[in-house]
Image (spheres, grey):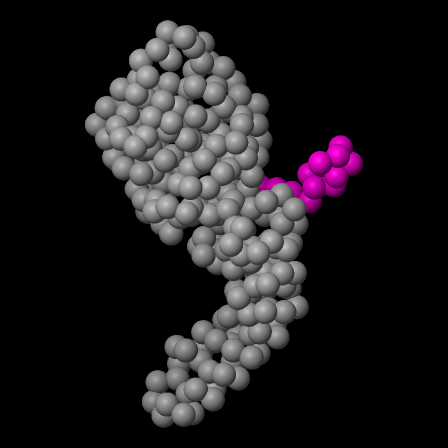
Amino acid sequence: MSAADYATVKAQLLGPGDMLRLKRWNTPTIYNGWEACTKRDRLEGLWNRQETHDFTPSLGTMVGRAVTIRIDPTNPSHPQDKPGAWDQWFAHVASLPGPKIVVMQDIGKPGAQGSFWGEVSANTHRSLGCVGTIVDGSIRDLDEMTNAGFKALARRLSVGHLHAWPVDWGGTVEVFGTRIEEGMLLHADKHGFIAIPPEDEENLLAAVLALDNAECETVIPVARFSSGLDHAAFLVRRKAAAARYGELAAKVARGSGEWR
């Protein structure tokens, strides 16, 4: 991407206020908006390809920009080889604008037995502007992390940290079968997560709002408030509502969304 192209894309990125608006919807609703406003095929979407576990569902959704890092709790040499890694990592996190979500690749899989995350790390990163983490490894101190208001999508729980240590950061990581670049906009909840490519951010909020309004005006009322109708009448009403939804969705669609 040229410098001019990058400047154009950067100017189109959503700010903290827009992220708060996106936080009002669940992640499947954000997917619907992305599908409508992207030119990519839906199979190219950047959501978790593997099962995730939301260990803090009471905290609702989280929205922020990816801060990427790799760890390897199974390698005891990292603390000796990289003695200043923690301070360097904290400085890196602090240098980036928030809200932030730490996207962490555990290269010590498949065991995922050593947790980078716990009460101290959650509170520390919260103070640095991070709202949560997506880690394809483990977490611990679950109640304390929840108390800190630090959301966590992870593979499992564990009791120990082993040799969890920052290995490298700021690059592309792969979590739950999906490659995430630092700075990407993320939306996550109990369903999983989705990352929004920079070129799709500008139209995302409008698309999500338009499709949510369209559903509330067409297919959802028919589906919810048609009890008592005979089947034939219900299907006629449902077909008309779906057609109207398709018309409204087409006004915001740039690609091949659900109703295109």
Would residue 91 be seen by someone viewing this image from the given angle? yes
Between 25 and 45, the one lying in front of the other is: 45
Q: How many marks?
A: 0
- The residue shown at (42%, 46%) is 48
- The residue shown at (30%, 42%) is 55
Q: Is residue 52 above or below residue 211?
A: above
- The residue shown at (53%, 84%) is 240
Q: Is residue 73 above or below residue 152?
A: above
Quadrant of residue 80 in the image?
A: top left
Query: Is 9 covered by the magenta stretch?
Result: yes
Left or right of 102? Residue 42 is right
Between 89 and 74, the one lying in front of the other is: 74
Between 44 and 224, the one lying in front of the other is: 44
Give the quadrant of the C terminus.
bottom right
Would residue 129 be seen by someone viewing this image from the given angle? no
Residue 39 x/y as whole percent: 64, 55
Between 200 and 46, the one lying in front of the other is: 46
Q: Is residue 51 above or below residue 107?
A: below
Quadrant of residue 12 in the image?
A: top right
Residue 17 x/y as whole percent: 58, 45
The magenta segment is 1-16
Q: Is residue 35 above or below residue 84?
A: below
Quadrant of residue 148 in the image?
A: top left
- The residue shown at (27%, 37%) is 156
Which secondary structure class fits the magenta region best? helix
